Image: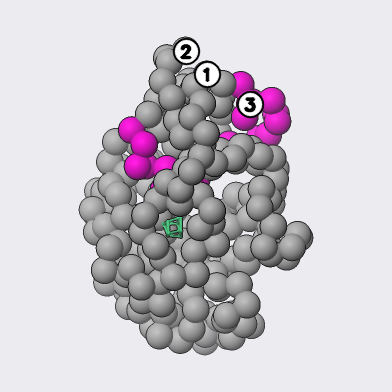
């Protein structure tokens, strides 16, 4: 294995809660550091601090859970260049690897075997203007067989966000080629309301709830 270190907030075993992999037992590797300051960030504790671990140690820890999927998340995992080595090594070990990124940094250098869950931040996040258009362009330029490794996620707080989301989906015809998951900011937008809009508009996106927030206390860490 290649050596190197990563600054890690936590490594834990839980149920994947918000993607097309929702429901699968999952080993989560949460990298420390972000700095984007999205309004309503539910992992603000990962924005600073962390413990420096050898990549080999991170891999051993994560594999110990024997989970069918391993998710690398944050914070913003792409801020640490060594994350690419981690992802590559996990793929070489024939693990199913998910990367969840805030969508501000390009995913261009990510190993093509990794399933990329890319946030598209709506206006209510306060950082909508920081969405990196390169990621949508990269996904659209991918070979059809490779497109399934891209997935987009929108977490919405109200009707303005929904209108922004549908106009973005129309502009890039994202649902023609990709899985698009649409969810609600927990406790802010009623999922039934979002469901009604999606059905009314015949949207070809998937409604998702943050599963872990319904299973456990929504404020709980490490789930
Ligand atoms: S990108 Fe993610 S971790 Fe960073 S501030 Fe935004 S929601 Fe929080």
Q: Is residue 47 above or below residue 209?
A: above
Q: Which residue is mark 2?
A: 1
Tell me which image quadrant ligand 1 sits in. Answer: bottom left
| Mark 2 neighbour class, 10 Å CA radius: few under 14, some 14 to 19, many 20 or more | few
Q: Is residue 15 above or below residue 58?
A: below
Q: Position of residue 189 (x, y in %)?
A: 57, 81
Visible residue check, residue 115: no
Q: Is residue 146 above or below residue 171?
A: above
Residue at point 26% right, 68% down?
Answer: 129
Q: Position of residue 21 (x, y in %)?
A: 60, 49
Q: Which residue is mark 1?
A: 56
Q: Secondary structure at mark 3?
A: helix
Q: Secondary structure at mark 1?
A: helix
Q: Which residue is mark 3?
A: 61
Mark 3 and mark 1 lie on one chain; the one further toward the N terminus is: 1
Based on the picture, tell me whether residue 196 belongs to the magenta stretch: no
Mark 1 and mark 2 lie on one chain; the one further toward the N terminus is: 2
Residues under labels 2 and 3: Cα distance?
Answer: 14 Å
User: Which residues are drawn in magenta?
Assistant: 60-81
184 vs 215, left or right, is left
Contact flag, marks 1 and 2 (Cβ < 8 Å): yes
Residue at point 37% right, 29% down?
Answer: 82
Visible residue check, residue 30: yes
Based on the picture, tell me whether residue 65 belongs to the magenta stretch: yes
64 vs 33, left or right, is right
Q: Secondary structure at mark 2?
A: loop
Q: Position of residue 113 (x, y in %)?
A: 43, 33
167 vs 11, left or right, is left
Of residues 137 and 201, the one nearer the viewer is 137
Q: Position of residue 109 (x, y in %)?
A: 29, 36
Q: Is mark 3 within 8 Å of ligand 1?
A: no
| Mark 1 neighbour class, 10 Å CA radius: few under 14, some 14 to 19, many 20 or more | some
């Amino acid at each position: 294995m290649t050596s190197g270190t990563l600054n890690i907030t936590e490594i834990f075993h839980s149920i994947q809660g918000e993607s097309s992999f929702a429901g699968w037992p999952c080993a989560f590797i949460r990298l420390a550091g972000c700095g984007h300051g999205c309004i309503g960030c539910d992992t603000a504790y990962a924005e600073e601090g962390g413990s420096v671990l050898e990549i080999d140690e991170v891999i051993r820890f994560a594999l110990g859970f024997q989970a069918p999927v391993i998710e690398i998340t944050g914070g913003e995992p792409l801020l640490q260049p060594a994350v690419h080595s981690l992802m590559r090594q996990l793929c070489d070990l024939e693990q199913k690897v998910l990367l969840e990124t805030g969508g501000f940094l390009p995913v261009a250098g990510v190993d093509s075997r990794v399933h990329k869950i890319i946030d598209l931040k709506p206006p209510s996040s306060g950082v909508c203007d920081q969405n990196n258009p390169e990621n949508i362009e990269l996904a659209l330029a991918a070979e059809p067989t490779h497109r399934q490794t891209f997935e987009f996620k929108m977490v919405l707080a109200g009707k303005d966000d929904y209108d922004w989301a549908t106009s973005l989906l129309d502009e890039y015809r994202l649902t023609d080629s990709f899985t698009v998951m649409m969810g609600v900011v927990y406790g802010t937008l009623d999922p039934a309301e979002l469901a009604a809009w999606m059905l009314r508009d015949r949207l070809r996106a998937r409604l998702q709830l943050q599963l872990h927030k319904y299973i456990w206390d929504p404020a709980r860490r490490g789930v």
